[in-house]
Protein backbone atom coordinates (compact mmCIF):
# COMPACT_ATOMS: atom_id res chain seq x y z
CA UNK A 1 0.00 0.00 0.00
CA UNK A 2 2.91 2.23 0.16
CA UNK A 3 2.79 2.61 -3.53
CA UNK A 4 -0.69 4.02 -3.52
CA UNK A 5 -0.18 6.50 -0.70
CA UNK A 6 2.38 9.16 -1.52
CA UNK A 7 4.85 10.37 1.00
CA UNK A 8 5.10 13.94 2.23
CA UNK A 9 8.48 14.48 0.57
CA UNK A 10 7.14 13.39 -2.78
CA UNK A 11 4.17 15.73 -2.47
CA UNK A 12 6.44 18.56 -1.33
CA UNK A 13 8.94 18.13 -4.18
CA UNK A 14 6.14 17.60 -6.70
CA UNK A 15 4.48 20.82 -5.51
CA UNK A 16 7.77 22.72 -5.69
CA UNK A 17 8.45 21.40 -9.19
CA UNK A 18 4.94 22.29 -10.24
CA UNK A 19 5.26 25.83 -8.84
CA UNK A 20 8.66 26.32 -10.53
CA UNK A 21 7.24 25.00 -13.77
CA UNK A 22 4.23 27.31 -13.40
CA UNK A 23 6.52 30.26 -12.65
CA UNK A 24 8.71 29.50 -15.66
CA UNK A 25 5.71 28.95 -17.94
CA UNK A 26 4.08 32.15 -16.69
CA UNK A 27 7.31 34.12 -16.98
CA UNK A 28 8.52 32.88 -20.35
CA UNK A 29 5.75 31.00 -22.19
CA UNK A 30 2.39 32.36 -21.04
CA UNK A 31 2.83 35.92 -22.36
CA UNK A 32 4.06 34.87 -25.83
CA UNK A 33 1.35 32.21 -26.10
CA UNK A 34 -1.42 34.63 -25.08
CA UNK A 35 0.06 37.33 -27.31
CA UNK A 36 0.18 34.87 -30.21
CA UNK A 37 -3.41 33.79 -29.51
CA UNK A 38 -4.52 37.43 -29.28
CA UNK A 39 -2.67 38.26 -32.50
CA UNK A 40 -4.23 35.25 -34.19
CA UNK A 41 -7.68 36.29 -32.96
CA UNK A 42 -7.14 39.83 -34.24
CA UNK A 43 -5.91 38.58 -37.63
CA UNK A 44 -8.96 36.31 -37.89
CA UNK A 45 -11.27 39.23 -36.98
CA UNK A 46 -9.45 41.44 -39.49
CA UNK A 47 -9.75 38.77 -42.19
CA UNK A 48 -13.47 38.37 -41.43
CA UNK A 49 -13.98 42.14 -41.62
CA UNK A 50 -12.01 42.32 -44.88
CA UNK A 51 -13.99 39.42 -46.30
CA UNK A 52 -17.23 41.15 -45.27
CA UNK A 53 -16.05 44.43 -46.84
CA UNK A 54 -15.00 42.57 -50.00
CA UNK A 55 -18.40 40.84 -50.12
CA UNK A 56 -20.15 44.21 -49.73
CA UNK A 57 -17.94 45.67 -52.48
CA UNK A 58 -18.73 42.71 -54.70
CA UNK A 59 -22.44 43.19 -54.07
CA UNK A 60 -22.10 46.91 -54.85
CA UNK A 61 -20.11 46.11 -58.01
CA UNK A 62 -22.68 43.50 -58.99
CA UNK A 63 -25.53 45.97 -58.54
CA UNK A 64 -23.55 48.62 -60.44
CA UNK A 65 -22.87 46.12 -63.22
CA UNK A 66 -26.57 45.23 -63.39
CA UNK A 67 -27.48 48.92 -63.48
CA UNK A 68 -24.91 49.65 -66.18
CA UNK A 69 -26.05 46.61 -68.16
CA UNK A 70 -29.67 47.76 -67.94
CA UNK A 71 -28.67 51.29 -68.97
CA UNK A 72 -26.67 49.90 -71.90
CA UNK A 73 -29.63 47.78 -72.98
CA UNK A 74 -31.96 50.77 -72.73
CA UNK A 75 -29.51 52.89 -74.74
CA UNK A 76 -29.19 50.15 -77.36
CA UNK A 77 -32.96 49.87 -77.63
CA UNK A 78 -33.27 53.65 -77.93
CA UNK A 79 -30.60 53.79 -80.63
CA UNK A 80 -32.22 50.95 -82.56
CA UNK A 81 -35.58 52.68 -82.34
CA UNK A 82 -34.08 55.95 -83.56
CA UNK A 83 -32.29 54.14 -86.39
CA UNK A 84 -35.54 52.47 -87.45
CA UNK A 85 -37.37 55.81 -87.35
CA UNK A 86 -34.65 57.45 -89.44
CA UNK A 87 -34.75 54.53 -91.88
CA UNK A 88 -38.53 54.85 -92.20
CA UNK A 89 -38.22 58.60 -92.76
CA UNK A 90 -35.55 58.11 -95.42
CA UNK A 91 -37.63 55.44 -97.17
CA UNK A 92 -40.76 57.61 -97.04
CA UNK A 93 -38.84 60.61 -98.39
CA UNK A 94 -37.27 58.49 -101.15
CA UNK A 95 -40.70 57.13 -102.12
CA UNK A 96 -42.19 60.63 -102.12
CA UNK A 97 -39.27 61.98 -104.17
CA UNK A 98 -39.58 59.10 -106.64
CA UNK A 99 -43.33 59.66 -106.92
CA UNK A 100 -42.86 63.40 -107.45
CA UNK A 101 -40.12 62.80 -110.03
CA UNK A 102 -42.30 60.21 -111.80
CA UNK A 103 -45.23 62.62 -111.89
CA UNK A 104 -42.94 65.32 -113.32
CA UNK A 105 -41.67 62.92 -115.99
CA UNK A 106 -45.22 61.85 -116.88
CA UNK A 107 -46.39 65.48 -117.06
CA UNK A 108 -43.38 66.40 -119.17
CA UNK A 109 -44.00 63.44 -121.48
CA UNK A 110 -47.69 64.37 -121.80
CA UNK A 111 -46.76 67.94 -122.64
CA UNK A 112 -44.19 66.77 -125.18
CA UNK A 113 -46.74 64.40 -126.75
CA UNK A 114 -49.36 67.16 -126.86
CA UNK A 115 -46.87 69.55 -128.44
CA UNK A 116 -45.85 66.95 -131.02
CA UNK A 117 -49.51 66.26 -131.71
CA UNK A 118 -50.19 69.97 -132.26
CA UNK A 119 -47.12 70.28 -134.47
CA UNK A 120 -48.13 67.20 -136.48
CA UNK A 121 -51.69 68.52 -136.90
CA UNK A 122 -50.38 71.92 -138.00
CA UNK A 123 -47.99 70.29 -140.46
CA UNK A 124 -50.79 68.05 -141.74
CA UNK A 125 -53.13 71.03 -142.12
CA UNK A 126 -50.46 72.93 -144.02
CA UNK A 127 -49.81 69.99 -146.33
CA UNK A 128 -53.55 69.41 -146.86
CA UNK A 129 -54.03 73.10 -147.59
CA UNK A 130 -51.15 73.14 -150.05
CA UNK A 131 -52.41 69.97 -151.75
CA UNK A 132 -55.95 71.33 -151.80
CA UNK A 133 -54.85 74.60 -153.31
CA UNK A 134 -52.71 72.79 -155.88
CA UNK A 135 -55.55 70.43 -156.87
CA UNK A 136 -58.08 73.23 -156.90
CA UNK A 137 -55.82 75.28 -159.09
CA UNK A 138 -55.40 72.45 -161.57
CA UNK A 139 -59.10 71.63 -161.58
CA UNK A 140 -60.10 75.23 -161.95
CA UNK A 141 -57.67 75.76 -164.76
CA UNK A 142 -59.25 72.97 -166.74
CA UNK A 143 -62.92 73.45 -165.96
CA UNK A 144 -63.35 77.14 -165.66
CA UNK A 145 -62.29 78.58 -168.88
CA UNK A 146 -64.76 81.44 -168.86
CA UNK A 147 -65.21 84.16 -166.28
CA UNK A 148 -68.91 83.54 -165.45
CA UNK A 149 -68.33 79.96 -164.43
CA UNK A 150 -65.43 81.06 -162.18
CA UNK A 151 -67.54 83.64 -160.36
CA UNK A 152 -70.42 81.19 -159.86
CA UNK A 153 -68.04 78.54 -158.55
CA UNK A 154 -66.41 81.01 -156.10
CA UNK A 155 -69.79 82.18 -154.80
CA UNK A 156 -70.96 78.61 -154.25
CA UNK A 157 -67.77 77.77 -152.33
CA UNK A 158 -68.03 80.90 -150.20
CA UNK A 159 -71.56 79.97 -149.17
CA UNK A 160 -70.57 76.41 -148.21
CA UNK A 161 -67.47 77.43 -146.19
CA UNK A 162 -68.17 77.97 -142.51
CA UNK A 163 -65.65 79.72 -140.31
CA UNK A 164 -64.38 77.47 -137.53
Image: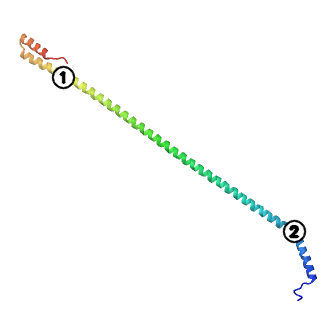
At x 52%, y 44%, the residue is 78
Q: How far apart are marks 2 and 1 (CA)?
A: 144 Å
> In the displayed structure, would residue 49 be above or below residue 75?
below
Please tell me how crowded label 2 is: few (under 14), some (14-19), or many (20+) other residues with Cα within 10 Å. Answer: few
Locate the C terminus by quadrant.
top left
SS for callout 2: helix
At x 64%, y 52%, the residue is 61
Residue 35 screen position, x and y as percent:
82, 64
At x 25%, y 25%, the residue is 118
> In the displayed structure, would residue 102 be above or below residue 144?
below
Quarter holding residue 30: bottom right
Residue linked to disc 2: 28
Quarter holding residue 24: bottom right
SS for callout 1: helix
Q: Which mark is residue 78?
A: none
Locate the N terminus by quadrant.
bottom right
Quarter holding residue 132: top left
Instruction: In this rendered view, identify the residue nearer to me: 142 or 1.
Output: 1
Q: Residue 127 carries which label?
A: 1
Residue 27 screen position, x and y as percent:
89, 68
Residue 102 screen position, x and y as percent:
35, 34
At x 45%, y 38%, the residue is 89
Along the horizontal axis of the image, is 106 left or right of 80?
A: left
Earlier-in-chain disc, 2 versus 1 = 2
Please tell me how crowded label 1 is: few (under 14), some (14-19), or many (20+) other residues with Cα within 10 Å. Answer: few
Instruction: In this rendered view, identify the residue nearer to me: 109 or 141.
Output: 109
Instruction: In this rendered view, identify the residue nearer to me: 117 or 32.
Output: 32
Choose mark 2 or mark 1, whichever is in front: 2
Along the horizontal axis of the image, is 114 left or right of 21?
A: left
Amino acid sequence: MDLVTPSIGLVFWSSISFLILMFLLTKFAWKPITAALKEREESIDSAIKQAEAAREQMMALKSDNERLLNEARAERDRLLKEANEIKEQILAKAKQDAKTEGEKLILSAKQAIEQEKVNALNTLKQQVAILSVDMAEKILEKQLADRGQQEAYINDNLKSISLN
